[in-house]
Amino acid sequence: MTTPHNHDLSSGLLGTEVPLNSPLITWKDGHTTILPAVYDDEQNNLCETVDIPIIEYLAKCPESTPHSRHVTHLSNHDLTTDTIEDVVGESLSRNKPVVIRGIGHHPVGEELTADFLDKHYAISPNRAVWIHDVKSRAIDHTKVTTAGVLKSVCESLRNPEKIQCVLDIPLAQISPPDTLRNLDHGLAHGWNHTSYDVEIKSNVHPENFTVKGWGLLHHAGFLTYPHHDAEGSLTWVRMDVGIKFWVVFRPINRRDDRKHLQDIAIKLGNFTQNEPWIRANCYAEVITLMPGDTLIIPPGQLHAVYTPVASFATGGHFYHHGCMHLTEISRYLDVVVGDCLTNQVLYYALETLRRMMIGIPRLSPRISLYRRSLLALCTMVMQGKQYRAKGGHQAAVADTETTALSTEIATAIASHLGVTKRKSASMLLYKGDQYERGNLVIRKKLDGVLARFTDL
């Protein structure tokens, strides 16, 4: 495999993992990579219509550095500080991705094979998976996956005629760095803290927990199109083997215009038809992830990913109280145009959000709450059925044992935050900068409003 610190990322790939005549491109930070190439019977490169124009645009975007205004850069040494959880949570709540350099471990010198994944991650070579194929996607974008086993994907890593990937390999045993494990407020302050107040009786969909750990396996040359991750979750990803260029987008202006934010998401989803508009309205920067690097992105973060060499990464999804305003926007987009904005299907966030709401009356004073973010959580709980993602199942927003209490608490908090019959929660949320979390909530006053919910 290509050495991660070598700027020539095409070396050793041509004629072995990718076609010998694959085109090359130099990125703004100096990396040279192959461009994807899969050919039809007339030897036309099927990637020239969509994939290559997008990659050419991404390659011209500036590199994200520690001086970035929009991305927080940390090192593995920062993880040893007592405040790291607060620093990361603060950045995410302000809609800033966080990249942490050089954490985790990388088995140096081992080739990415089915045996490697079996030995280090307990992924059986015989595991059934859905395989995403670039050639199939180029021919018919509605039929991009086929069923197969992991071993076949690994064996085809050295087949120049194939570019494939497997998304979301379930790895429930995977977790973020220990000092960041409590960032998962849905688990730590939702599910963990509420079973006394509301016993778990209904059939909870396993998706509430299986999304917390997964693996990503990619061939060299795979482009993941611009999208945001489903159901308003935050995403963390750790680069285990290989390299990824993770490109994050943000609006240049009109952050107070929800329709404009929707337009950006839609037009990025159809990049080749809207490139001039995107250049005029979006800012993008490239976060280069190497083995040991971890990236955490806030809810709704629009991003594209190019994998220039065979790679394996681990990661997961979670929720955070400081980011609920971003979760709400993301889930709103899932309702309006969700079928064209995400590369995966997740539907069952509501039960976790209800549990987070039920946990607020007993929430640790260490956890900061912000007005717009808290109001967004209230809105998603009180209007749960209105946030069913486009194409989602009715069961995803069904009433359960948590519905009544979570709604009662949300209504009390919303009233405390200024919601009235004439001034709805949506009216307050849709006003102003949609990425702003709002002022810090005075917990003493809020605790007084919620005191009746803490009786034993």
Image (cartoon, rainbow, N blue to C red):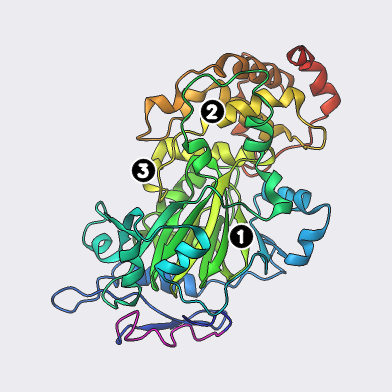
Which residue is rendered at x = 70% and y = 51% of the image?
A: 180
How far, Cα to Cα, is label 1 from label 2? 26 Å
Left or right, 392 with reference to 383: left
Q: Tell me the kind of residue under disc 2.
A: Glu
x and y percentages locating residue 130 in the rendered image: 32, 53
Which label sits on residue 276? none
Residue 373 lies in magenta, yes or no? no
Pointer 1 or 2: first along the chain:
1
Q: Which residue is mark 1?
A: 295
The front one of 424 and 188 is 188
**Label 2: how many Cα within 10 Å (few below 14, some 14–19, many 20+):** many
Q: Tell me the kind of residue under disc 1.
A: Leu
Q: Tell me the kind of residue under disc 3.
A: Asp
x and y percentages locating residue 257 in the rendered image: 55, 42
Q: Which residue is mark 3?
A: 339
Query: Would you say residue 305 is visible in this rendering?
Result: no
x and y percentages locating residue 381 in the rendered image: 57, 24
Q: Main secondary structure of the magenta part?
A: loop
How far, Cα to Cα, is label 2 from label 3? 22 Å
Which residue is rendered at x = 31% and y = 86% of the image?
A: 15
Q: Which residues are magenta?
A: 6-19
User: Is disc 3 placed on a helix, strand or loop?
Assistant: helix
Pointer 3 or 1: first along the chain:
1
Query: Would you say residue 429 is visible in this rendering?
Result: yes
Q: Is residue 96 above or below residue 116?
A: above
Q: Which residue is mark 2?
A: 351
